[in-house]
């Protein structure tokens, strides 16, 4: 059924760039955004020396300051990462984890640092009691102690710093901006204020959260600041002791005690035994550009798979926001998500056919299933084995030397488990919810296993093999089509990076409605409905469609361009 | 120095005067305790309204998905409906917007039948407006006898217009400021 329309005039007046202006020409739905009033101005940035694109402007500036002080892209990324844990506490932090793709100018091949959390040793496939809808009773996989896995963030970021940093800056110097922000206080934006309101109940449930994230017992208002002295203290300990500050000793004891008080099963041994994994990236091509991305349990394989399918269609000729192009995107997404749910999991526990999933030959068989005049109703997973041979945040850093870093990290849902460890400021993640909660799936819970993720930090090299683009996004499963759409917007349509990020997006899972942002063309909407798609129209700029932060290297001009997502608080910085 | 002190004192007095000058549309208490709180739209704003009622010393029971049948057994004299929709909340509750409106209408009708006072509260501001939220607001406000709104959520006068001349509406600048009108509404 078609969604209701309104006669409310669209908001051309707030469009801050020509691109955004053009993209706003067609409005299907009224504005309802967590970021009202929406700010489209000043999201992008340029620089001859370096650009950082992150989910908070202050975090981007932290990275730039590190570059100015002689740090390399990894130093800047690690500083930005710690700062985001303070400045965007709802999305990532010490209680979570993520993936980082690093390619320094001198490296022949990129490296992937997997610092995804792992299931505790006492975790079992049937550890959650499920209701009739297959969800954990009492929301236990999302809220409270049982939702938390063993966090990986601090070990991951510090591993990157130690192995790929410039060594010109100390650990203490790189972490200091995060300490400063925790002491000084984080500005409450429209976006953050709304997220706190939405999660007020969860934060209140476990007592300690509201001590930090409430003012006089109510959510802070826009313009307030959130000071987190406890987190500053924890960061100072990391400055002094490194990862041991979190994984051993007093703070580890506090984490375990609070987790178990809230029904969790974490132990000191779980924390002491946590290890990051250094993985080989998965690499493919899209129309001559090389795409380097994170393998399972990350989602990069499926970004590549989606691009491989799309390569069989001339998207440029099909037209921007046309019915035909949107139909191809929707059908390709269905096939990718069918495969993802069947095959993708932690490769240390399950044999994932990711080379087959990412192969051109397999994509050819999938592309042949897409008919221009028919809608797939029940797409099934394919068989890639024949082709075998072998709430999150994202930020990207590139510098003039061609060093590239893409990092996606998360505590999972906004404000995660809601459990804040007393006297540390640490919000414990709820990544356990990313496992399949029922036994019998490749992604079912096992002790020490990493849960499947859609996080897909990605690097793109141009046809000459030069650094071209670093990008990634939050947004759960929407990450995969979102990244593919941004890459396509740049490569197929020649859009500047900011326009490519701001352009309206669509999303299609294996089943269910095709959803599209309200700015998508009305003609495409009508055409898709006529083809048999059931279309849900989302707000004009819908944060659910992700928050892409990317840097693009214009080699002709020897200039870096950063793009950041207006759907959240993203803003790039450069110099 | 003396002039500066006088100016400062005058400013403080003026501010105090302004703060105390808010007049309320509701002139006398209309609601009896205890209250029953539910949402119309499944938004998380119910958590903030619970804090407001705690601060207002109003005892209450709360159920975001309450059914009409629960009202009579609750012993509540006043129904507080938290206005505004949330896609995420509806998804978590496993109900559609249409089903939520049906639930709300049945609940409001039962409250009237039981002689309960109905108070609508909108604390979500501008973000808790738009196509989805406005459907719920439209369905619930006409049944209310009093409405309290954080002003940002009624910039366009939509809720004021729904209240018309028969339903008193009071607006506050911040969520925390909603304590006072709610306190005054209860006997």
Image: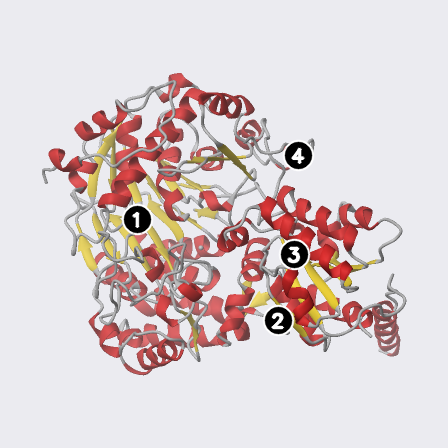
Q: Residue at x 48, y 43 (%)?
A: A565
Q: Residues within 10 Å of mark 2 (few under 14, many from 20)?
A: some
Chain for disc number 4? A
Which label number is shown at residue B124? 3
Q: What element carries label 2?
A: loop
Residue in front for this viewpoint, A189 or B75: B75
Mark 3 nearby-residue class (10 Å; few <14, some 14–19, many ≥20)? many
Q: Which of marks 1 and 2 is nearer the N terminus?
A: 2
Q: How far apart are marks 3 and 4 (CA)?
A: 25 Å
- Going 30% across and 48% down the picture, which residue do you hit? A405
Q: Pick whichever of labels 4 and 1 is earlier in the sequence.
A: 4
Q: How far apart are marks 3 and 2 (CA)?
A: 16 Å
CA–CA distance in space, label 2 to label 4: 34 Å
Nearer the observer: mark 1 or 3; the answer is 3
Chain ID, mark 2: A
> Which element is circle 1 on?
strand
Whether labels 2 and 4 share one chain: yes
Name the residue beneath numbered marker 2. A215
Residue A13: which disc? Answer: 4
**Disc number placed over residue A405 in the picture, else none:** 1
Question: Tag 4, which secondary structure?
Answer: helix
Reading the chain from its start, which is encountered first: label 2 or label 4? 4
C-alpha distance separating marks 1 and 2: 37 Å
- Report in which chain the residue with disc 3 lies: B
């Amino acid at each position: 059924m078609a969604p209701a329309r309104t006669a409310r005039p669209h908001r051309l007046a707030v469009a801050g760039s020509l691109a955004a202006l053009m993209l706003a020409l067609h409005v299907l739905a009224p504005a309802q955004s967590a970021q009202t009033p929406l700010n489209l101005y000043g999201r992008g940035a340029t620089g001859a020396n370096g650009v950082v694109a992150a989910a908070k402007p202050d975090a981007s500036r932290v990275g730039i300051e590190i570059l100015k002080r002689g740090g390399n892209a990894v130093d800047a990324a690690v500083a930005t990462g710690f700062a985001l844990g303070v400045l965007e506490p709802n999305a990532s932090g010490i209680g979570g984890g993520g993936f980082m793709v690093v390619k320094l100018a001198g490296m022949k091949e990129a490296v992937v640092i997997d610092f995804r959390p792992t299931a505790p040793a006492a975790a079992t496939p049937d550890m959650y009691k499920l209701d009739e809808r297959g969800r954990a009773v009492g929301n236990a996989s999302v809220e409270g102690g049982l939702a938390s896995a063993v966090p990986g963030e601090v070990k991951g970021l510090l591993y990157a710093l130690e192995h790929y940093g410039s060594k010109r800056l100390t650990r203490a110097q790189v972490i200091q901006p995060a300490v400063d922000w925790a002491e000084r206080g984080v500005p409450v934006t429209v976006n953050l204020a709304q997220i706190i309101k939405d999660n007020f109940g969860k934060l209140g449930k476990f007592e300690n959260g509201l001590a930090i994230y409430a003012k006089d017992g109510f959510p802070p208002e826009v313009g307030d600041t959130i000071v987190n002295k406890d987190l500053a203290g924890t960061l100072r300990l990391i400055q002094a002791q490194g990862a041991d500050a979190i994984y051993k000793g007093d703070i580890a004891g506090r984490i375990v005690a609070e987790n178990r008080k809230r029904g969790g099963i974490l132990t000191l041994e779980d924390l002491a035994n946590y290890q990051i994994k250094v993985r080989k990236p998965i690499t493919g091509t899209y129309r001559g550009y090389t795409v380097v991305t994170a393998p399972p349990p990350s989602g990069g394989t499926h970004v590549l798979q989606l691009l491989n399918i799309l390569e069989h269609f001339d998207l440029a000729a099909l037209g921007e926001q046309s019915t035909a192009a949107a139909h191809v995107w929707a059908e390709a997404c269905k096939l990718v998500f069918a495969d993802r749910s069947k095959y993708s999991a932690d490769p240390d526990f399950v044999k994932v056919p990711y080379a087959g999933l990412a192969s051109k030959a397999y994509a050819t068989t999938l592309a042949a299933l897409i008919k221009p005049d028919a809608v797939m109703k029940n797409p099934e997973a394919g068989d890639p084995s024949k082709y075998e041979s072998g709430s999150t945040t994202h930020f990207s850093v590139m510098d003039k030397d061609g060093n590239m870093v893409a990092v996606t990290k998360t505590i999972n849902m906004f404000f995660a488990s809601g459990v804040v460890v007393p006297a540390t400021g640490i919000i414990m993640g709820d990544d356990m919810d990313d496992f399949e909660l029922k036994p019998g799936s490749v992604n079912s819970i096992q002790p020490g296993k990493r849960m499947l993720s859609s996080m897909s930090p990605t690097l793109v090299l141009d046809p000459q093999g030069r650094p071209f683009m670093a990008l990634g996004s939050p947004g759960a499963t929407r990450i995969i089509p979102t990244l593919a759409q941004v890459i396509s917007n740049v490569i197929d349509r020649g859009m500047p990076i900011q326009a490519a990020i701001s352009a309206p997006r669509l999303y299609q899972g294996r089943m269910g409605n095709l959803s599209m942002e309200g700015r998508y063309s009305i003609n495409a909407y009508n055409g898709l409905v006529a083809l048999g798609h059931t279309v849900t129209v989302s707000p004009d700029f819908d944060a659910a469609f992700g928050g892409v932060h990317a840097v693009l290297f214009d080699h002709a001009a020897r200039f870096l361009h950063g793009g950041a997502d207006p759907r959240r608080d993203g803003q790039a910085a450069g110099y | 120095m003396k002039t500066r002190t006088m100016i400062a004192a005058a400013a403080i007095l003026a501010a105090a005067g302004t703060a105390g000058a808010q007049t309320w549309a509701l002139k006398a208490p209309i609601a009896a305790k205890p209250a029953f709180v539910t949402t119309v739209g499944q938004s998380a704003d119910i958590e903030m309204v619970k804090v407001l009622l705690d601060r207002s010393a109003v005892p209450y029971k709360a159920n975001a998905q309450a059914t009409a049948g629960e009202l009579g057994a609750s012993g509540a004299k006043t129904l507080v409906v938290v206005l505004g929709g949330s896609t995420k909340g509806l998804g978590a509750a496993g109900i559609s917007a249409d089903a939520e409106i049906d639930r709300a209408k049945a609940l409001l009708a039962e409250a009237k039948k039981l002689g309960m006072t109905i108070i609508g509260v909108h604390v979500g501001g501008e973000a808790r407006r738009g196509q989805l939220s406005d459907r719920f607001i439209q369905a619930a406000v006409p049944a209310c006898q009093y409405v309290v709104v954080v002003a940002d959520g009624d910039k366009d006068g939509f809720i004021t217009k729904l209240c018309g001349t028969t339903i008193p509406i009071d607006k506050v600048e911040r969520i925390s400021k909603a304590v006072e009108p709610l306190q005054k509404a209860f006997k």
